[in-house]
Amino acid sequence: MLRCAILGLGYWGRNYVRVVGERRDAVLVAVCDPSEDAVEAARAASADHAPWRVTCDPREVFAADDIDAVVVATPATSHFDLVHEALDAGKHVLSEKPLAMSTDACRHLVDTAVRAGKTLLVGHTFVYNPAVRAAKKLVAAGDLGDILHLHAVWSASGPVRHDVNALWDLAPHPISIMTYLVGRPTAVSATGQRILPGDLEDLATLHLRFGNRATADIHVSWLGPRKTRMLTITGARRVAIFDDMAGPDKLRVYDTAAEDLLLAEPGRISEVFEAPAHVPVIPTSEPLAAQFAHFVECCRFGVTPQGDGLTADDVVGVLEAAHASLAENGAPIVLERASA
């Protein structure tokens, strides 16, 4: 039985309370949040309504002998210190994304976890989505042909954050999916705008290049009219679209070959047509629950995490470069390591 504590009872913290309560191989021992309202909201979301200990001081959690693992679901800028202290205290850690705000900080946490002999898993939840995993199989098998371009839109009408901009808030998701599908990009550029009052970009557009000649564009925004979580994967033979808001049919595959769009004769316009869609049958499961189940497995049996600190380092490296590009009016930034 993995004995857990949760730091932070905002949106994701409350969801972790529910997910932990649904498992038989884990138990929630304590929660940490300074807000009484947040604690009560978490109790209401709990399946077992267990009488956890409540504290506003994370040091009490780190010092507790009856806690094996800590979930860090606090604001992004606090992750490094809390994860570091938890590892130093001998706890396994599941941290919400991003793991830290720089690649150097990520690598330090990875080294700390290795020295402590503890699991460090980062919550890039979308790579546990069954539809994303099905897309990975299509890419790996060559069913889409050579990957030419990826296009992602991650937007909604808020919530607007005050600790990080829209780039750091929303882009980790499509970046982690793209890295999972085709490897780490080799270069990135980014532009953004500040429309709402404040010093943080409300929207941003990233352009990525990969070592296999594929390119990608990512648009993130707090100003979208509706919640959008969509990724289009354009291959030489087929196109796959992942739409997390599309109900049960989140993945569609279209028989749209790039060569079919070539002009039949010089000077003639190719016909416009709608390709037929194939909807793969994909088992349904909650990505957050699957991620936590994997975390429990890693902690209890020493399994290497799929979303470990090195993966998080890749994602943060792209974010860090994109942030630098923002400051340089979209200048391309070459990344340190080539795509896998």
Image (tube, grey):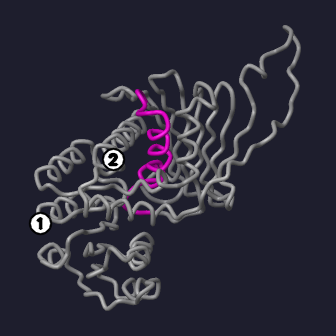
In the rendered image, the vertical position of residue 329 relative to residue 312, given as above or below: above
Task: Name the kind of residue labelled 1 in the image.
Answer: Ala
Which quarter of the image is occupied by the N terminus? bottom left
Q: Earlier in the sequence, mark 2 or mark 1?
A: 1
Task: Name the kind of residue labelled 2 in the image.
Answer: Ala
Q: Residue furthest front?
A: 301
Q: Residue 211's mark?
A: none
Identify the image quadrant of residue 260: top right
| Residue behind mark 2 | 312
Q: Residue furthest top?
A: 266
Q: Nearer the viewer, residue 285 or 167?
A: 285
Relative to residue 286, is residue 336 drawn left or right? left
Label 1, residues with CA under 10 Å away: few <14, some 14-19, many ≥20: some
Is 95 included in the stretch rendered in magenta? no
| Residue behind mark 1 | 89
Kind of element beneath mark 2: helix
Label 2, residues with CA under 10 Å away: few <14, some 14-19, many ≥20: many
Kind of element beneath mark 1: loop
Which quarter of the image is occupied by the C terminus? top left
Q: Nearer the viewer, residue 89 or 319?
A: 89
Query: Over which residues does the magenta segment extend?
Result: 161-187
In the rendered image, the vertical position of residue 95 relative to residue 150, given as above or below: below
Q: Position of residue 61 (x, y in %)?
A: 18, 76
Q: CA distance from mark 2 to mark 1?
A: 22 Å
Q: Nearer the viewer, residue 153 or 42?
A: 42
Relative to residue 100, is residue 125 drawn left or right? right
Q: Position of residue 181 (x, y in %)?
A: 49, 38
Q: Position of residue 295 (x, y in %)?
A: 33, 61
Relative to residue 87, is residue 307 drawn left or right? right
Q: Position of residue 113 (x, y in %)?
A: 17, 53
Residue found at x 43% / y 31%: 185
